[in-house]
Amino acid sequence: MNLYYAPGACSLADHIALNEAGVPYSLIGIDRAKRTEDGRDYLTVNPRGYVPALELDDGTVLTENLAILAYIAQRSDNLFTEGGMTPWRALEAISFMSSAIHGNLVPFFKNLPTGEKERARTALVKHFASLDDQLGDRPFLLGEHMTIADPYLFWCLRSAPVSGIELPARLRAFFVRMSKMPSVQKALAEEGLN
Ligand SMILES: N[C@@H](CCC(=O)N[C@@H](CS)C(=O)NCC(=O)O)C(=O)O
């Protein structure tokens, strides 16, 4: 399968999850002009124009982080761990991060007016505090094992400095722990990030 990505974009979460799941993949980079690294118009893959997109071996294209991460989890024994409520909690967390965190990072990515950034900064402080409380002193957001919520949280934390806010201590420690994991190191290296 092919993961369409841009270095450091939210597709990094799916990239990490693929590594963690042990699912074989190829990477296809997208540039700002929305051309694939092999010279195609990316809009023919994802007409919405954004990454990530996951192209399955039969040519089916899946978009949206939440759907792609859930698909990867279902292909692995690792990332939905333990059954019960865990898969639903993971989807709950990704949905929250996608709207409350990712949504409020957009004013900084797109350099929107100062008022918009101030409003977003206030929201981010509140929402990161909520994630810090949820994490508590556990190694991963939902407990002892990594789920698909963690690579997405890692990407949110990696992106947070663009907003200028200070992250809570337990989230900072989580970020350091995750940064050392082989699945994360491999993804960062493959995207040319440190
Ligand atoms: N709702 C989408 C949002 C994806 C998204 O915002 N991707 C960004 C990178 S983090 C992107 O490709 N932006 C470029 C653009 O919108 O043209 C998802 O969760 O997958």
Image (cartoon, rainbow, N blue to C red):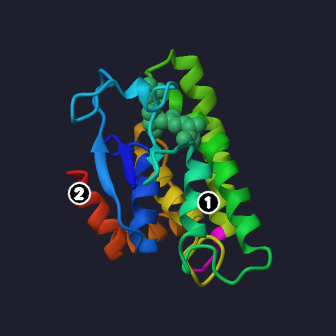
- Quickly name the residue at label 2: 190
Is 51 in front, or is 95? 51
Quadrant, the C terminus: bottom left
Magenta highlight: main SS = loop
What residue occupies the far front of the structure in this picture?
A: 58
Badge 2 vs badge 1, beta-carbon distance below 8 Å: no
Left or right side of 96 for 72: left
Circle 2 packing at 10 Å, graded few (<14), some (14-19), many (20+), is few
Residue type at mark 1 is: Ala
Residue at the spot 52% in from the left edge and 30% down from the top edge: 106
Is 140 in front, or is 125? 140
Q: Which residues are drawn in magenta?
A: 135-139
Left or right side of 171 for 129: right
Task: Name above or below for residue 157 compared with residue 73.
Answer: above
Residue at the spot 65% in from the left edge and 60% down from the top edge: 131
Q: Would the CB of label 2 be found within 8 Å of ligand 1?
A: no
Task: Name above or below for residue 113 compared with residue 20.
Answer: above
Residue 110 quadrant: top left
Residue 137 on the magenta segment = yes
Secondary structure at numbered mark 2: helix
Residue 107 x/y as whole percent: 52, 26
Is 137 in front, or is 166? 137
Left or right side of 7 for 192: left
Quadrant, the N terminus: bottom left
Residue 29 x/y as whole percent: 28, 40
Residue 31 x/y as whole percent: 27, 30
Residue type at mark 2 is: Glu
Q: Which mark is residue 70?
A: 1
Is 76 in front, or is 133? 76
Residue at the spot 61% in from the left edge and 51% down from the top edge: 66
Mark 2 or 1 closer to N-term?
1
Residue at the spot 48% in from the left edge and 31% down from the top edge: 46
